[in-house]
Every structure is written in structure tokens, then in C-alpha cells.
Amino acid sequence: MSLPDERKYAVLGTTPIRTDGYEKVTGAARYTADMSLPGMLYAAGLSAGIPNGRIISMDTEEAKKMPGVAAVVIAEDLPKMISASSHPFLANRPRCAGDLVAIVAAETKEAAEAAISHIHVEYEEYPAVMTIKEALAEGAPQVRDEYPGNVFSDTHYQIRLGNGEEAFKKCDVILEREYETQIVEHAYIEPEAVMAYTNPSDGLMTVHCPSQAPYYTRRYVAEILGIPVARVRVVQETIGGTFGGKEDGLGMMAARCAYL
């Protein structure tokens, strides 16, 4: 590509070589999932599997007796612990099929996953909303009490400049349409993993993760643990893809488990 004014740029108008490309395509790149520490425990989470309801009873005794299991944590073990979105870190009142209701820490990944299957939960299911139209319909079940009408108002912004209604009056044609698309999950070239531990020498919480927003992760890990942000260190490891998906709370979950 030639630039109109013929100025020379170091990056614009060139095809820079990806400095991490060779390691990634050859499999030599080290990701968080490749890391380990002596005595490291592996965590696995149990999702509610129902869209809306409450836990009537949960039996974790069988899971606790499984070989290699170090701990089983449920909501009652963290009565005041919330995630950065003000949603319970572990739910006893799940509002989404993906809400975690229990976490197992074990000596191996296989042991943690095996123990999860031995946690027995009984739910009382409530009516749920499955689409945007259902959520906004009159009389729809309320997902969260703090958001009447199922409208998430925390990120609702008013137009500060201009007048939309006046602009519409000047239009020759106004076209309104609705578009729908399928759910798409991000596809990374590496397993999504996080490693967290407290440093024995200074007590700092250290989190190794492929977060695309390490300072975001650092701030919310501190909030979840109830410690100063200066006591949290986040190390951004090799990222095999983000697409917006590396902003979730995986680092917070690992930090919470390591802090128990």
C-alpha cells in the first residue's frame, strides 16, 4: 500500500512480522495451562444447569471423600463474597444455567472433575425468560430484583449531544429492522486457564492468566478478596486469542480458591 504523501512509517503501510507467530504455530508458546507449582491444586466448578431457581439441598459429602480432593466450597462458605458484577460468586439462588453452585479443589484436574459429578443438588425451579422479547414482556419473571423490567440500567447512557427526534423529522426515509444471529463462543488456540497463589515471602496474591485486561482483573481480584489493590499482582501470560472473552472472572475464581 502506498501512502499519498509518500511519508515513510515504521508500521503504517507495512506488513510487520508477528513476534509471537512462530512460537504459536509450532506449539512452542508457553500458556498458563503449561505452568505448574509444587503442591498445586486444580479447581473445577459445578454449574447450576437450570435457568432460574433456588437450591433446596446440596450433598457434598461423597465428593469430599473422593481421592485427591482437598476442599469443596459452596455459597454458605463465602457468605459475603460477591463477584465484580455484584452477583454472588457462588450461587444458592441461580439465575443462569452457568451460575456456579460449588467449587472443588483437588490434587489433579481429573480428581476435581470426578468429584464434581458426585455433588448432588436438589433445586426448586422457577419460570425463566429465554429471549429478549420474553424478558421485556409485561409480567415477565424478574431475573434480578435490582433491575425492574429486566433492564440492565448500569450501562444505560443518555444522548448528551444532538436531538434524535429532530433528526428523524429531517429524514426522507427511516428504515427499521430487527436482526438475529446465533450464539457464538470464542475459539482460542490455547486452553483457558488461570494459576493463582499467595507469595510465601510477602503474602501478595499473584494471578497468572491470559487476561486481555490485567488491570481490570487486578482491581476485581482485590475487591473479591477484600484486600488493597497493591496486594494483588496480575501477570499477563501468552494470549492465544481474546475476542472479548478474556475479560471474564476466571482469574477471580482462581484467586478466591487460592485465598481460602
Image: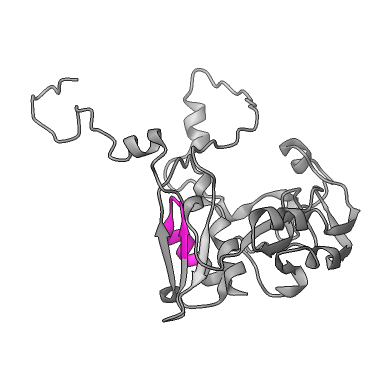
Is residue 221 found left or right of 152 in the rendered image? Answer: left
Q: Measured along the vertical axis of the image, is residue 119 above or below residue 259?
A: above
Rendering coords of residue 191 (x, y %): 54, 44
> Viewer-proximal residue, 100 or 2?
100
Q: Residue sitting at 14 percent across and 36 percent down?
A: 10
- Which quadrant would the C terminus be assigned to in this image? bottom right
Is residue 213 found left or right of 154 in the rendered image? Answer: left
Rendering coords of residue 159 (x, y %): 48, 46
Rendering coords of residue 155 (x, y %): 55, 52
Return the residue found at the far top.
172
Return the residue found at the far bottom.
202
Q: Residue sitting at 62 percent across and 25 percent down?
A: 179
Q: Residue sitting at 66 percent across and 71 percent down?
A: 81
Residue range of the region highlighted in magenta in the rendering: 207-219
Colour approach in the figure: one colour
Rendering coords of residue 69 (x, y %): 72, 65
Does residue 243 show up magenta in the picture? Answer: no
Which quadrant of the figure has residue 101? bottom right
> Viewer-proximal residue, 195 or 58?
195
Q: Is residue 161 visible?
A: yes
> Viewer-proximal residue, 171 or 22?
22
Is residue 87 found left or right of 145 in the rendered image? Answer: left
